[in-house]
Amino acid sequence: MKCTKCGGDYRTRELRCPYCGTENLLGKLWMVEKTQAELEWMRAHEDKRKSKWTVYDINRILGRLAVVLFGINLFAVLLVIVGSLGSYGVNQLKKAFNKDDIYAVTREYYEAGQYYKMYQYMSEQDVLHDKEMEKYREIAIYSYEYEGYQEDLADFYQALGEYRARPGEEEEEDLLRKTTYLLDACCDILRIHDDVSYFEEAKSVEIITEWKDEILALLKGTFLLSEEEAADLAKEKYPSIELLEEMAGKLTERRYWESWVE
């Protein structure tokens, strides 16, 4: 069988993995069943044995029972220790044992350009703030911001399409709301530190710069903001909801979509 911890192969009857020492519950169960079978065999042949058990027989049985009881007690102690650690303690132990694997998977996501999946994985493994993950931390966190921007952008275009097809009061309110959300998401990306040279990975600098350029292109291309307006919005690291709603209202009043070429 394979060890659930280190993956080593060993006999099912072993009480522990011979490679990493992890307890084998199947082995313990087999030992209990084997001991029980031996006891039943002795009872079945008791009538044939005229003499009492020898000291050797008694010691043999007691020795096997001692092994089983020791294993059961050890397992119970481990359960108590794990329970006292709580979920956080268990996760920390898992991190310590799987450190190399976690780092390798994170690197694979990074090399494949799957930054949001990398963020999700690092969050699940609780390694976002580990020192070993510094080179991936910033791009992972910003990928979360970028994913939010993409979702808001899709919602905005859907609301805009509905408003252009049926420009009613309800549709206009929805468009204003979705425009406000999108502008807020744009600011989340633009507030990334202007000097991204502190990133360890050059690839991170490149992709974050691309995201910021994409946002500026949206503001000046889709919303037809002037260079000055786009620069002013980019300066607002944490804009108020009132400012964003005011900007969304101005954009809608301009009817920017009328100048688009279908």
Image (spheres, rainbow, N blue to C red):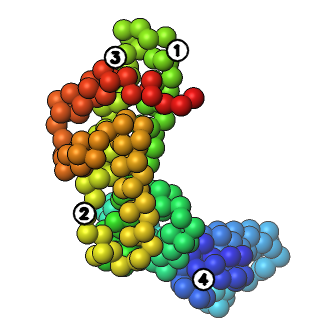
| Figure quadrant of the C terminus | top right
Mark 3 or mark 2, earlier in chain = 3
Q: Residue under label 2, please give it.
A: 193
The residue mark sitting in front, 2 or 4, is: 2
Looking at the picture, which amino acid does disc 3 mark? Glu
Looking at the picture, which amino acid does disc 2 mark? His
* Front in this rendered view, residue 72 or 49: 72
The residue mark sitting in front, 3 or 4, is: 3
Mark 4 or mark 1, earlier in chain = 4
* Disc 3 from disc 2: Cα separation: 33 Å
In the rendered view, does 157 fall on the left or right side of 31? left
The residue mark sitting in front, 4 or 1, is: 1
Q: Secondary structure at mark 3?
A: helix
Residue 247 is situated, as x and y percent measured from the top left of the image, at 24, 31
Mark 2 or mark 4, earlier in chain = 4
| Residue 108 seen by the camera | yes
Q: Which mark is residue 173?
A: 3
Give the residue at x 51% y 58%: 117
Q: Residue under label 4, please give it.
A: 17
Q: Secondary structure at mark 4?
A: loop
Say if mark 3 contacts mark 2, CB within 8 Å.
Answer: no
